[in-house]
Amino acid sequence: MGIRLQSSFRSSNDDYYKIEIHDTAYSGTAVDVKLGGNGFTLNHDGETDTIFSPIIGSSVSLTIYNDDPLVDAFSTALLSAQDKQFYIRIERVRNVAAGFKERVEADGGTFEGFECLEQKIDALDGASEPAADEYGLFWTGYIIQDLIEEADESKPRAIQLNAADGISLLSTIDYEFSLAASEKTIKEILVDILDSSGISSLFESDEILLTTSTHWWADEHTYNVSNDPMDLTRFDLKIFTEYFDDGSRSYTNALDVIREISKTFGARFYFDTSFRFEQIGFRDNVNIREFRYLPTGTLDDSGTLSLDVSVDQNSVYRSGGNFRYLPAVKRVLLSQQKIFSDNLIRNSISFPADEIDIGIIPSLDNGRVIFELQSKIQTYISSSQQGTATPLFTATIRLEPSDGSATRYWKNSLIVNTLVFGPGSWSTSSDTFKFAGNLVSRSASAKTTKSHTISTGPLPTDGEIYVDIDFLGFYDFGLDPTFIASPNSFDWGVALNAVKYENDNNPADVIETIFSASNTSSSLGSNINVDLGSTRLGDGPGAVGSLYVYDGADWVPSTGWRTGNSGTYVDVSNLCVSEILALQSSVVKRFEGTTIHGHNFKSRLIFDSAFWIQLRGSYNANRDEYNGEWFKISRVTATTSLDDPIIDTGIDDGAADIFDFSGMYSNVGSGSVGNMPVSFDEESIGPYQQTTTGGKINGSAVVTGDTNLQAGLTHDGFLIQNIQDVTNSAGSSYDVSDTDYMIFNTWTGTTGTATINLPAAADNEGRLLRFKSDGTIAANKIINLVARSGETIDGNGEFAFDRDYDGVMLLAHNDAWFIIQRKAK
């Protein structure tokens, strides 16, 4: 490994840069090359057009001139190189001539320029360049082979090289962490990714690989500015894996892991002298805390500092710019996927297969594990026999406690000479949980399937859950081996479709929660939503995907977060949406132009009595010019209000029969109750059937007592319903409730626009809503009916209800609202 090409230059701001092109397969002498007029150009660019981008990548482009056969050899080797063989390191010394001119003139001398000084030093056999130990890492990254350009001309000819900081490389690398040590802190995860991807090898052992700058603290944390919250917060990385059908696991690419962590904590990840994980809302403070880590993950140092640069038009300039504006945001949303309730294995696994590892499962609040399965039997009957038999299966559900105590097994018993199973229980002796498939014939070949759901009893302790499924035998007043005697045979399989976790406070059917914060400003004129996407991380019961924090003695599930050491604790996802909205709750002023100084991308600029954070930009190192885009950072929480989370429940695909220790969670899918047949497929017991909104009786109903209706009554197509009166005014807002049907609108006060927010059409299939106005509504007193984000009203996001004595009826269908009736005037 060695330096193949090298060069250096001094910028207009008297910053000294040293550029090295490394070849991991080279052991020769470095060749000095000439650079193009820019020295190099550094670019930063985010993934979004909004002021919050969780990932900001950087790249460098530079031109070298080929006037040496050794440069030809470099070019040949570069084009045939292996991935990550060539990389660029740029080191910098800031303002090497700082104060020199002033000192010369103060002594009565004449300053003739820094170049004259260099010539005199060189003539005296001195060192005109800074000493090696004065340089600090400015940027490093891998050369991108498919972006190399070489001029088709005689020597010296230009070769343009482009390199990327490694962040984009992470999208091509799966983060294959150790399953045996899958619980890591966020700091450990970031360092581990940079190390396992090879990116940390671009750094010297004493250089800073990662800097964190965060100010969110969990309720369970012990607040201490000397501690890094990201080194006191961890989760089980199995959230980023899923099983394949053969029992093997697939992994998430490393960039998606970092992106999801960044979204969860309102942070952005980028490179600026080191990789930085910083919460963007923290930059509204003059002083910020930083924790700086070496490539080994060891803390090098930490401290509170200011990264502000004052644009004084004296030593730091801005020019050639324009001010643009981003409208205020109405709502910020983040979806938190409850993988522990949805499916911990994220796939369907077919047994027979090797035992699979589900992950760490907590016992808090009667924590239990639910397995949704489907058994399959195919028989091949060559020698017909009389009667029928029942296939039996076993599930080995093993709990390895985190406290090191004895391994537990979830088990039940098969009562001799009857097809009856005993209650489930935990045992320290190796055992299995047995369940039966559908009855099969002895006389003819057939295929049969059956759905099952197994729920363990409350876990006796936290621990890692493993499961294996096998075939026990056929039952016919005992296990009957003669059924499968030659020439008869059979095939079997059990599909494990889902593994879910629940406890008394976290039902397994809640698979997603949408958190949002709304702008309550009365002067807000926009209806812009910013959707941050989804995350699988968040506060939870301690299952896979739940955040754990260190409370000074133990690692415990987090229950709430806040910024700094004051304020109310809220769910981490609520804190995320409220903090991002706080930066955009009013019109955001944006500067697009040029600054001249040589400051860093992470620097916060001060001009026009405001603070400015950079979003993207292109830096010409030779001229110390940043041509970029900055936004005025001002965190305002006064008009930020948290909405009620929207909870999405899933469909239980498991099915027929949950066996557990007491019958508490029994879900009988066949047989009869009081001579009423039970149907799992129809979700009914006799005439009583479950529906999405409640239930119904199929047939006549005789009610012998009083009937108390708490909501409206539907009868032969006519709705008997209370009228909901809504008084609207300029800037007012009303959310249609679950029980509203006829909404009668009046207006009070001055002219303006009011808003009525419709419920989600996706959750109200077939629902009708009617709106009526009286004489107070007019063209200058407008009520906007607004659909949920992603939904429409006759193809539009909103509908203006602006006529007196008007009337309109809406129908929810296919995830949208449709106007089915409108009063004519």
Image (cartoon, rainbow, N blue to C red):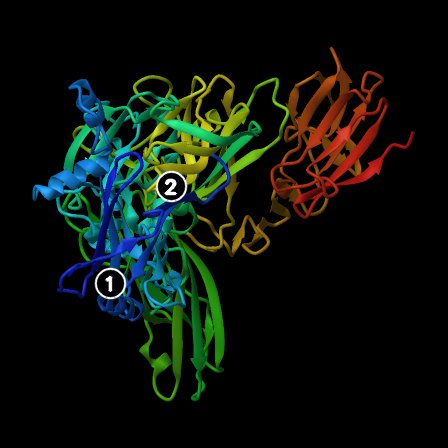
* Residue 461 position in % (x across, y down): 23, 42
Camera-nearest residue between 700 and 729: 729
Amino acid carrying mark 1 in the image: Gln
Q: Is residue 400 left or right of residue 79?
A: left
Q: Residues within 10 Å of mark 2 (few under 14, many from 20)?
A: many
Front residue of this view, candidates 740 and 46: 46
| Residue highlighted by disc 1 | 85
> Which corner quadrant holds the N terminus?
bottom left
Left or right of 156: which side holds 681? right
**Number of other residues with Cα within 10 Å of mark 1, as a class: few under 14, some 14 to 19, many 20 or more:** some
Residue on which disc 2 sits: 619
Give the x, y percent position of residue 554.
Answer: 19, 33
Give the quadrant of residue 573: top left
Nearest the viewer among 604 and 815 is 604
Q: Distance between the residues labelled 1 and 2?
A: 26 Å
Q: In this view, does 768 lie above or below 436?
A: above
Q: Which residue lies furthest to the left in this view?
A: 125
Regarding mark 2 in the picture, which secondary structure is present there? strand
Residue 710: x and y in percent read 65, 26
